[in-house]
Image (tube, rainbow, N blue to C red):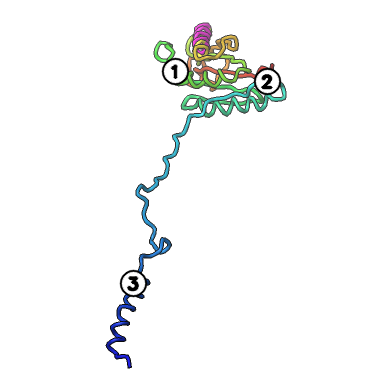
Amino acid sequence: MIKSSSIANFAVPLLALFLASCGGPPSVAELPPQPSARPSLPKPAAPARPVAPVAPAGPLTVARIGSYMDGLETELRQHVHGDGIIITRMGDDVTVVLRNDILFGRGGVMNADDVLEPLGAVLGAYVHTSVAVGGYTDTVGTPEQNMAISAKRAKLIADGLAHEGVAPQRITSQGYGATHLRVATGDGKAEPRNRRIEILLKAKPG
């Protein structure tokens, strides 16, 4: 007959062995996910790049004039804007109106880099256009004086555009004095809106 003490002596180590086999290290699937040593960070957004004016390449056909001038108008409105600047469109012609006080300082000295640089960049890219620069005055002064002043200022702006890269053979300039007022006034009336430069842009196919 087997004594109970012998059974106990045999069962205890057997039970310990069984528990040891069941209590081994957890499998990889049971392990909790470990944090990465170097957490990934979101990449910073790339800085916005300025949009450079780009004109359609190749010769300009009559059929493409409308879309070509659409592109020119869009680029002008994007790059040439501010107080004293008006851009208008009539048919396929685009006109840029620049008030004199943003172009000239005291004594008629030209101070227009902030305007002429972006304007010259756009017009320099749109090579299939003519650039007619017109100068205008208010009704202060004699007709002869106004005609001379407006012609001089138109020439200064034309030369400034050429300096910014617009081909000189594309540019003409002319003074109109007080003959085409934007705001109707009597004689001898100072009106800043009448003292201006108007740049007429026309498509030239070919």
Q: In terms of depth relative to the viewer, which is nearer, 142 or 34?
A: 34
Which image quarter holds the C terminus?
top right
In terms of secondary structure, where does tag 2 sit? loop
Residue 129 appears in the figure: yes
Residue marked by disc 3: 20
Residue 46 picture location, percent across and down: 45, 36
Number of the label disc, if any, that sits on residue 80: none
Give the spatial CA distance, label 1 vs label 3: 87 Å
Residue marked by disc 1: 113
Residue 130 picture location, percent across and down: 62, 15
From what the image shows, is residue 84 above or below residue 43? above
* Mark 2 neighbour class, 10 Å CA radius: few under 14, some 14 to 19, many 20 or more: some
From what the image shows, is residue 76 above or below residue 141? below
Name, please, the residue furthest toward the front. 1
Number of the label disc, if any, that sits on residue 60: 2
In terms of secondary structure, where does tag 1 sit? helix
Q: Is residue 147 magenta?
A: yes
From what the image shows, is residue 50 above or below residue 130? below
Q: Residue at x 52, y 6 (%)?
A: 144
Q: Amino acid at mark 2?
A: Leu
Q: In terms of depth relative to the viewer, which is nearer, 93 or 197?
A: 93
Give the spatial CA distance, label 2 vs label 3: 89 Å
* Mark 1 neighbour class, 10 Å CA radius: few under 14, some 14 to 19, many 20 or more: some
Q: Amino acid at mark 1?
A: Asp
Q: Is residue 96 magenta?
A: no
Q: Residue at x 42, y 41 (%)?
A: 43
Q: Depth-wise, is mark 2 or mark 3 nearer the camera?
A: 3
Q: Which residues are magenta?
A: 144-158
